[in-house]
Amino acid sequence: MKDANMTETLTFTDPRLAELDGFHVQLNVSNERADIILARPPYNVISMGARDQLRLVFEALDADDRVRIIVISGEGEHFSSGGNIKGFLEASPEHVSHLAWNIAAPSRCTKPVIAANRGYTFGVGFELSLACDFRIVSETCRYALPEQKLGQIPGSGGSARLQKIVGVTRTKDIVMRSKRIPGQQALDWGIATECVPDGDLEQAVTDLVTELREFSPMAQRTAKKLLNDTDDALLSTAIEMEGLNYSRLRQSEDFREGVEAFHAKRKPAFTGR
């Protein structure tokens, strides 16, 4: 159903998504925005089943032409305190082997994905956020990978992604000490994209959505894939891949529109072609 803001609760044809486990999805067609909202108060614990469903939802939204930008957030004071601890003991080895693939869904998604983090953003909540393209945090945000306290290590890409961002020394400090990183420190260390007062988080995310929608969808998809693919490439390989993608985009209608709009001193009307 739709509300006054023209936001509707999204349902899916896939029977595996007939009943979402601890989260819901909203669509605002006029803003080309989809929101995945973790909703298992008070801490928005992410169940094992929800991990499978989150992957499927990202794949469905990636294929939905009405959606340009995806935002993932949590209801209430916290993004997520992490996973269902008991669920790890109950899950089969095969299921556990899929955890990292499921949580990497935001990274594989061709569209920009924004994580809106406040309060506890622990364990899989942190790992899910690290797989997103942008992390907008409130000053109340606390990032942590607390698995050492359970005699375990992060299992969904957390330590690997974090090391790419902050280096091995800081990653050891976070992982091996189960250390909590405040929002401002996360910004200073390059983990967060932006840190804002708690009451400004939603507006900061909305502003970023508005900004991203002004760019060419094709150029954004290309930039995201290129940056992901070259993250661990040699510099010479990365430069070559950048050049190949640049040449491909030169043939696009969006590039022509961008150049013509620049010379005409008007706002470009990109179509994604």
Image (cartoon, helix red, strand yellow):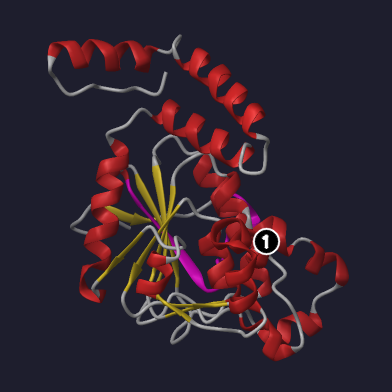
Kindly tell me whether residue 17 is visible in this rendering: no
Quick check: 190 above or below 171?
A: above
What residue lies at 61% left-to-right and 24% top-to-bottom?
241
Quick check: 90 above or below 261?
A: below
Q: Which residue is mark 1?
A: 160
Q: Quadrant of residue 237?
A: top right
Q: Is residue 22 left or right of residue 220?
A: right
User: Was residue 27 drawn as part of the magenta stretch in this picture?
Assistant: yes
- Secondary structure type for disc 1: helix
Q: Is residue 203 left or right of residue 13?
A: left
Q: Quadrant of residue 261?
A: top left
Q: Is residue 52 left or right of residue 60?
A: right
Rendering coords of residue 223 (x, y %): 48, 33
What residue lies at 76% left-to-right and 88% top-to-bottom?
151
**Depth check, front residue: 93 or 264:** 264
Q: Give the extent of the magenta segment.
A: 13-28
What residue lies at 81% left-to-right and 63% top-to-bottom?
97
Quick check: 99 above or below 241?
A: below
Report the amino acid beneath label 1. Ala
Rendering coords of residue 196 (x, y %): 26, 68
**Depth check, front residue: 224 or 86:** 224
For disc 1, the neighbor class at 10 Å (few under 14, some 14 to 19, many from 20) is some
**Depth check, front residue: 110 or 177:** 177
